Image (cartoon, rainbow, N blue to C red):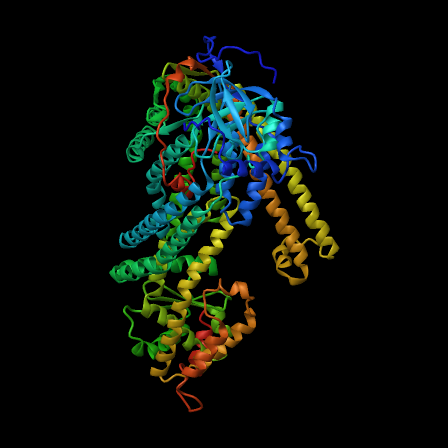
Amino acid sequence: MTVIPQVSRVAPAPPAGPRKLKYSALGGLIFRIAFRGALLTLLTLGLHRFWMTTRLRRAYWAGIEVDGEPLEYDGKPTELLLGFFVAVVVLAVILGGMNLALVFGGILAGLDLQIAFNASLPLLIPLGYYAQYRARRYLAARTRWRGLRFGMAGGAGRYMLAATGHLLLTIATLGLLYPRMHQRLAKFQQERTFYGTLRFRQDGRWQRMMGPWLWTWGVMVVAVAPVGWQGYAAYQAIQDAANGQGPISPEDNEALGQQILAAMGFFFGALVLSWPLRRWYAARAEAVLMGGLGLGGARFASSLRAGTLMGVDVKGWAVMLFAMTLAVGVFIGIVFAAAASLGKVDEEMFENIFGLLLQAETAGFAVAVIGGYVAIIILFFSIGQITGVHWPLRARIEALHVEGVETLSEARQRERDDAAEAGGFADALDVGAGF
Amino acid sequence: MRRRPEASPTRSTWARGSEAVFGRRGGRRAPGEEPATALARYALLEASGDYHDGMTARSREVLVKFGRASLTLSRFDETPVTHWALASLRALDGPQGGGVLRLTPDPESDERLTLRDPAMIEAIRAVCPDLDRAPPLGRSALRIGAWAGGAVGALALIVFVLVPALADRLAPLVPYEQELRLGEAVVEQIDRVMAGGAGFCEDPAGRAALRRLSDRLMPHAELPMPARLQVLNSPNLNAFAAPGGQVVILSGLLENAASVDEVAAVLAHELGHVAARDPLRGALRAAGSAGILGLVIGDVLGGTIVVAVGDAMINAAYTREAEEAADAYAHALLARAGLPSRPMSMFFRRLANRVGAAPGLLDHLRSHPDFESRIDAALAADTVGDRAFQPALTDADWVALQQICE
């Protein structure tokens, strides 16, 4: 309010080395938006989710400050809604035709119907990449900083081809070359992204991501191999039984069950053991991909540490576990109390719970149970928004630096990109590009 | 981007501005206070802010003051930069800005102003109650409605017209051998689920009786493929038709039937499905419409339940018409074979008493037409009446058939 008169500062003060990005989104605000949004989404059979998504994005974007000025999300929920309508109709034609053709072909080829049906899932993956690029393009087109728009050039079709190629290569190398795919796809997207008239560059080297990846990959391969082997053995046993070589004897059956159980235990054990390694990889990937990112004369850098990510994980799990235990505990308590008031508590109660729900005389009881269930789903979603998006985002943003941010003032405004279908494909296929 | 002329606001702008000042919330204005004084309270307020002109990424520090129903932005040497009408002013980040207020002169503009001065933020919030108002839907609501209607119509067209039509065209193209192979897999699954994989009932006398029952109906059936009748040991009161002309009767049906003519009627109904190739068409239709509802609801928040119910409803709609057709086929087949269709109505009556009437909502989920109309149709179609007729099987054969699983 008290202003010391001074000459308008057209040119900002000279830079003082790299500047940290600031993350200032408030967890309470995010939680409130998510909770209210989830409730309304349930009540509107999913229609409200476009409004919720827009509010959440506005809050997240406004919480990311670069050189003192927050980002801005200016997408509209109605754009998402319209994009969704378009995408749903197009996808319904594709999905319906594809499933019909696959099942028809499967019958002609004498395949098991379930196998023919499941074959549609791999065919959906390229479509998912296409959708992901389109969604990213919409997000870029609706992001501003200092009033200037970001934007993304077209290329969803080429991205789909490139990504599918990389995926096939990654599968062919049993996952070994995943970091290459990771960096190349990021590069593909980023080098088509603009801030105003300035284009982003990506020259991070995926080879630098290989160290942590080799360790992670090694542990996962060691873990997955016996599972694959056991799965194959079980499949063989079932095939033999189906081919009339006698049903599986109870002893064989039990032994098989134990083997499968052991393999699964091994797998999940390895999943837990590889957790620090996976976080190590994630931190390294962030360092490489952010370190390789440039825009005009500005360069980014991330000092994200695996330990920070693991801390976020642990905190998230703890909060989620605590909240869910509490909520489910309260829920079961209410169910018992309500059932007791109806005089129906006995050991068969849980077997009859659905019968109880359907009885007209216990309508109040049913409402209480369904209400409790809905409340738990909403709570799960809104806490997940904090633990799964807000906290990880904060960890990433607070580790980011930008050098030469003052050179960005040479950027000029770019035209508005309608990005008409607004990520609707990604929404319908559930491959939404974050948030 | 669009710099407003420095001239004073037009009369109409002022009117809108004063409406905003009177606003629904009225800000911190005391009751009865005139709008001019509400604005006058802040007349001397000044603050600095970061201004972005929407054309370049340059940040400019500006001096922000209130003018007549407007916000004036000027350089520190008092050179005016721009001024924004209060009425069309919008906040970017919603009501909670975390100590920052970001403004745009109107929803379409690229210009931005970032304020951090608490007193100035409070003042602007007080005199601009529409700050957080979303632009009215207006014509875009119509457009959304049109698109929603179009999308729903297109989806209905796909699910209820295109997919069934395509399935019906494809079904005759499947060779019998492939259909049989598919049918065998289906029957195997029925065996696993309903009879615990015990296999078919093979009592020789019972098989012979079943063959004779089949011989009684088949000459009149005119099927596109040979039918194969089998009995599974399961207490359920039911029968199925699977692709490839396979008909499976559950032994519970044999035990609970009052007469062999009831079994013949059920069999005739299943042969109706075989004649129309319903099982294959049904499989193709279900494949074509599967997953479409999942797209609409999305995977949010337990939408899976809604999707499952919806899929069941779509499939039920498919099968209801097939069931009616199979009933009509059965009536005609029974008449040609010299058998009454009255036992069919008696069988349905028993089934109805056993199941109980489904409440209204569940009615839409049922794959079969309601019992009352099926009973009426069977009674109306009966060509035998009270006349004597040759039963479908002799008493001895009927007993043998009932004991096929022993």
Marker count (numbered): 0
Q: Quadrant of residue A403?
A: top left
Q: Is residue B374 above or below residue B53?
A: below
Give how far across and how far down residue A386 sits, in percent.
56, 32
Q: Nearer the viewer, residue B130 or A60?
A: B130
Q: Is A171 left, or right, of A346 in this rendering?
A: left
Q: Is B315 left, or right, of B39 in this rendering?
A: left
Q: Is residue B257 above or below residue A166?
A: below
Q: Is residue B250 above or below residue B398?
A: above
Give how far across and how far down residue B362 sits, in percent.
53, 63
Residue shown at the point (64%, 31%) measured from the top left? B38
Give how far across and how far down residue A45 sits, in percent.
51, 49
Q: Nearer the viewer, residue B347 or A96?
A: A96
- Asked whether residue B211 appears in the rendered view, the answer is yes
Q: Is A102 left, or right, of A57 in this rendering?
A: left
Q: Nearer the viewer, residue A330 or B172?
A: A330
Quadrant the N terminus of chain B occupies: top left
Give how far across and how far down residue B52 sits, in percent.
45, 22
Residue shown at the point (47%, 12%) measured from the top left? A9
